[in-house]
Image (cartoon, rainbow, N blue to C red):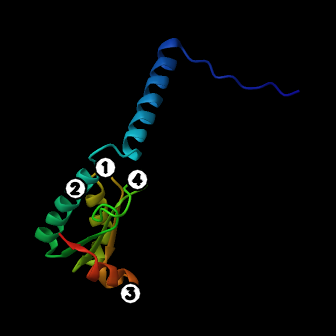
């Protein structure tokens, strides 16, 4: 029988390890579980993101999805769905990285020009111009 490797921790290292893991778990749970008022917070973040995109790139931003529609349920899986006209596609991923840091919610940023026809139709008909 092969001996099993054991890792020995001092009390202080083990305590630090447990506290850090617990903190990360609580931070994760805080991020994914919607609290009362989270829809309003997400909507506020979406307007802030839209202001950034409008002032920096001159883009038109449409909000779609559960953040902007009261008839749709806002859950822990909800994200901020934005369709953006006039976004420079060559710097899309750097823009997405900046936008992602502006909110605690996941952001689904879609360039209007690269969107599928049904998504363009939703943005045009049901989207909220931010």
Q: Could you say which is closer to the camera, residue 100 or residue 128?
A: 128
Residue at left offset 34%, top offset 67%: 65
Question: Who comes first in sequence, dot 3 or dot 1?
Answer: 1
In the drawing, what numbered circle is on residue 75?
A: 4
Q: Are marks 4 and 2 in contact (CB under 8 Å)?
A: no
Residue at left offset 23%, top offset 53%: 40
Q: Quadrant of the C terminus?
A: bottom left
The residue that disc 3 covers is 117
| Residue farthest along the bottom direction in this orientation | 117
The residue that disc 1 covers is 104
Pointer 1 local density, CA inside 10 Å: few below 14, some 14–19, many at least 20: some
Closer to the observer: label 4 or label 3? 4
Q: Quadrant of the N terminus?
A: top right
Question: Who comes first in sequence, dot 4 or dot 2?
Answer: 2
In the drawing, what numbered circle is on residue 11?
A: none
| Residue farthest along the front direction in this orientation | 71
The residue that disc 2 covers is 45
Q: Position of residue 117 (x, y in %)?
A: 38, 87
């Amino acid at each position: 029988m092969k001996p099993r490797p054991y890792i020995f921790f001092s009390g202080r290292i083990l305590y630090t390890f447990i506290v850090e893991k617990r903190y990360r778990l609580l931070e994760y749970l805080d991020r994914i579980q919607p609290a009362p008022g989270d829809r309003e917070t997400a909507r506020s973040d979406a307007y802030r993101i839209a202001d950034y995109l409008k002032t920096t790139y001159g883009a038109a931003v449409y909000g779609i999805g559960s953040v902007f529609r009261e008839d749709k349920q806002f859950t822990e899986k909800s994200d901020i769905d934005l369709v953006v006209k006039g976004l420079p596609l060559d710097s899309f991923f750097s823009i997405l990285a900046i936008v992602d840091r502006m909110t605690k919610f996941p952001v689904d940023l879609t360039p209007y020009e690269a969107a599928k026809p049904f998504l363009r139709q939703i943005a045009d008909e049901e989207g909220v111009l931010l």
